[in-house]
Image (cartoon, grey):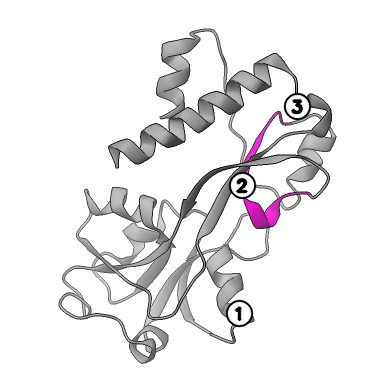
Amino acid sequence: HLMVLAHEQAHRVRFHLLPQVEQPQRALEQGEADLLVIPKEFCSPDHPTDTVFLDDFVCAVCNQGRFRDRELTLDSYLAAGHVIMQPPAGGQSLESDYMRRQGVERRVEVSTFSFMTAPHLVVGTDRIATLHRRLALQASRHLPIRLLRPPLPIPPMVQVMQWHKHRSKDPGLLWLRQTLLAAAARMDQVN
C-alpha cells in the first residue's frame, strides 16, 4: 500500500529497503536509515515514534493436517512441532520472547529468517506457525492453510515508525511518515 501511494503521489521517490539488524537504532544514529518500521519493543527511547498499526497473532496449520477440523488446546499446541521465525540479526521474535517469559517452550522443528516463509513451511505437515494475522490472512488466500486462535494469550504487536529526533521537521521525512500512515489506513480498509 505504501508503494502504491508513493507511486501515485511522487514518481521520483526512491526506496531502499534494508534487512533487519540487531540494533536498528544505530542506523538512525549513523544516518544510514531515514525511518525504521519495527515493533515498538525494538525502538530506541531516544527518538520519536508513531504507531502505524497493531496486529494480533494467529496459528497457521495445514488444512489437510492433524488440525484440519479441530481447535488448538494448549496441550496439542505444545506437543506439536513448530515453525518459528528466527530474526536474521539474532535474538527472538516477539511471540517467541513472550512465550519464553511465560515459561512456554515450543518444540521447534523448523526455523526460518522470515515470517513470509513460515506459512509455506506448514503445508503438508502437522506443524504450527504462530504469526501476525495480516500476513497469515494474505498467505491463506494462496496456500492450503487454516488459521486458528492461539491457545494462550499473546499480546498484539505494535508496529511503529521511528526517526531521528533531529529530523522531525524534515519535509521529505514528514511526507514519508504521513504517506505511511495513510497506507496503513488504506491497508485496513482493503483487508
- Residue shown at the point (48%, 18%) measured from the top left: 6
Is 160 contained in the magenta span?
A: no
Residue 133: quadrant of the picture:
bottom left
Task: Look at the numbered disc 1 and give the secondary structure of its residue.
Answer: helix
Image check: 60 left or right of 115? left
Q: CA distance from mark 2 to mark 1?
A: 20 Å
Look at mark 2 in the image and give the residue it sits on: 38
Q: Nearer the viewer, residue 59 or 173?
A: 173
Q: Position of residue 74 (x, y in %)?
A: 38, 87
| 183 relative position to 121: left or right | right
Q: CA distance from mark 3 to mark 2?
A: 18 Å
- Assess disc 2: are there few (<14), some (14-19) or many (≥20) residues with their C-alpha within 10 Å of its C-alpha: some
Q: Could you say which quadrant of the image residue 59 lies in?
A: bottom left
* Rendered location of residue 88, percent (x, y): 62, 54
Task: Tell me which segment is drawn in magenta.
Answer: 33-44
In the displayed structure image, the side of residue 165 where residue 78 appears, left or right: left
Q: Going by the image, does 73 lie left or right of 29? A: left
Residue 168 badge: 3
Residue at position x 30%, y 81% in the image: 72
Q: Which residue is mark 1?
A: 100
Q: Secondary structure at mark 3?
A: loop
